[in-house]
Image (cartoon, grey):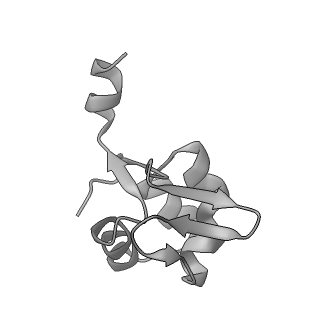
């Protein structure tokens, strides 16, 4: 599981389109919980904030990352890349 301060983002192989959330590997996403959070995820949101703001379960986030629907970046990786 990602830490609470890990930042979730839309991966390069996915896109939030007018027609829905599309992933090159799995097609269009129908996960209502993920779709309800895409505004936050598109801008980059910490795991902890997503859980607090949307009541998302850690198991859902783990499944989304395992399925390649979102990617998680640890804050140290973000600051060292700058």
Residue 74 at x, y = what percent?
A: 29, 41
The answer to which of 30 and 26 lies nearer the viewer is 26
Question: How many numbered marks appear?
Answer: 0
Assign the N terminus to one quadrant of the image. Answer: bottom left
Q: In this view, does 77 lie to the left or right of 9?
A: left
The answer to which of 80 and 58 lies nearer the viewer is 80
Residue 72 at x, y = what percent?
A: 34, 51
Q: Is residue 63 left or right of residue 14?
A: left
Q: Which residue is drawn at 35% across and 64% down?
A: 68
Q: In this view, does 14 lie to the left or right of 47?
A: right
The answer to which of 54 and 34 lies nearer the viewer is 34
Residue 69 at x, y = what percent?
A: 42, 66
Res. 38 visible in picture:
yes
Q: Residue at x 60, y 83 (%)?
A: 32
Picture quadrant where residue 40 is located:
bottom right
Q: Residue at x 64, y 59 (%)?
A: 16
């Amino acid at each position: 599981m990602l830490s609470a301060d890990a930042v979730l983002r839309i991966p390069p192989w996915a896109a939030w389109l007018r027609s829905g959330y599309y992933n090159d590997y799995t097609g269009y996403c129908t996960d209502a919980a993920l779709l309800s959070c895409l505004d936050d995820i598109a801008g980059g949101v910490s795991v902890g904030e997503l859980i607090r703001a949307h009541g998302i379960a850690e198991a859902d986030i783990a499944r989304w990352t395992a399925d390649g629907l979102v990617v998680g970046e640890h804050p140290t990786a973000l600051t060292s890349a700058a």
